[in-house]
Amino acid sequence: MKKVLITGAAGFLGSHLSERFLKDGFHVFGMDNFITGSKKNIELLSSFEHFEFIKCDVSKHIDFKGDLDYILHFASPASPIDYLKIPIQTLKVGSLGTHNLLGLAKAKKAVILVASTSEVYGDPLVHPQVESYFGNVNPIGPRGVYDEAKRFQEAITMAYHRFHNLNTKIVRIFNTYGPRMRLNDGRVLPAFIGQALRGEDITIFGDGKQTRSFCYVDDLVDGIVKLLFSNYNYPINVGNPDEITINEFAQEILTLTGTNQKIVYKPLPENDPLKRRPDISLALKKLNWKPSVDRKVGLRKTYDYFCTLNREELFEKDHQSFEKFNKL
Ligand code: UDP
């Protein structure tokens, strides 16, 4: 049985990936420190015989006994409001955490895949974003802690590949949605659905003309699995190129939830990218991958999930007390 270590297993993507590998017959070690992840996801994964949970802050030393075939590094705060609240941890998990996991991969002779992001392109001046574009990132802006940590992550991963001949993979993930997103993580889809379910105003930041391209989580997981087993070692975009404005997206959510909330406009956060759409020709060519879930179908599945949450979860404002983590 092949063994895979997945960091961030209590998070949205980490839990979906863990489930996929368990269903595909792997032994999965899930790591998390619960800084943004949810215990509920670990409970769900624990129902599989071949799942083992290890509580660990990967930014510190990782002590792992036994063999490993694959490592997937998905631990990181990933929502703009999270990395504003825990900036130092965001920088550490992308840099020190990645370094530790590359060291572990080298020691175990494991293949390692790291989760990068469309944020490496910053507020892009090239549209759609192609892998050869170097990006337009403000290193000292509020998003800099995430963007620069992920850019460093790509750099150190390529260095381990070139210098140590490590078999590394880098996926640049674009906006992804689906069941198990945290309702209060601040991202646009859970924000709008949460507001609709609670009967609150829908908050659009800026004029709502900024665009995003949303990929359903099952499609993303498929792309990641294909990349892991490919022989491609350079960064590759995985996302859905179906681009819409945030105004259009708000209307889609209102139609989906059957509500007619008032839309209110708030100031656009600093350095919020105006456009985002992946060019996925490389993924098609190298991995024979493209997304297949239509947004209408994906949004329905996601909404059905959010409808299963209880009142307490629906009104929970702050997921965690980040205070104690900021002291670390
Ligand atoms: N956004 C919004 N209202 C909200 C939350 C987000 O208008 O309540 C906007 C946000 O300013 C951005 C887009 O939706 O332009 C996507 O934001 P998200 O936080 O989901 O992710 P990003 O793609 O910016 O990392």
Image: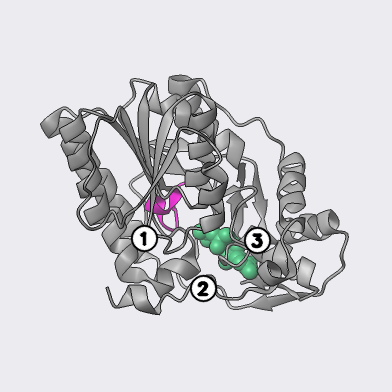
Q: Which residue is mark 1?
A: 146
Q: Earlier in the sequence, mark 2 or mark 3?
A: 3
Q: Quadrant of residue 239?
A: top right
Q: Earlier in the sequence, mark 3 or mark 1?
A: 1
Residue drawn at the location 46% of the way across and 28% of the way down: 225
Q: Residue 105: x and y, percent?
A: 22, 35
Residue 11 sits above or below residue 65 on the image: below
Q: Considering depth in this image, is 207 or 178 the residue closer to the camera?
A: 178
* Labels 1, 2: front one: 1
Numbered disc 3: secondary structure = helix
Q: Residue 135: x and y, percent?
A: 36, 51
Ligand 1: give its quadrant.
Answer: bottom right
Question: Identity of the amino acid at label 1?
Answer: Tyr
Estimate the spatial distance between the alpha carbons at disc 1 and disc 2, rounded to whole Å.
15 Å
* Labels 2, 3: front one: 3
Numbered disc 2: secondary structure = loop
Residue drawn at the location 36% of the way across and 60% of the way down: 146
Question: Identity of the amino acid at label 2?
Answer: Pro
Residues in magenta?
118-127
Q: Which residue is mark 2?
A: 269
Chief secondary structure of the magenta portion: loop
Q: Earlier in the sequence, mark 1 or mark 2?
A: 1
- Give the number of the disc on residue 86: none
Q: Are marks 3 and 1 in contact (CB under 8 Å)?
A: no
Q: How dense is the environment of label 1, judged by Cα within 10 Å: few (below 14), some, or many (20 and up)?
A: many
Which image quadrant: the C terminus? Answer: bottom left
Estimate the spatial distance between the alpha carbons at disc 3 and disc 1, rounded to whole Å.
20 Å
- Give the number of the disc on residue 190: 3
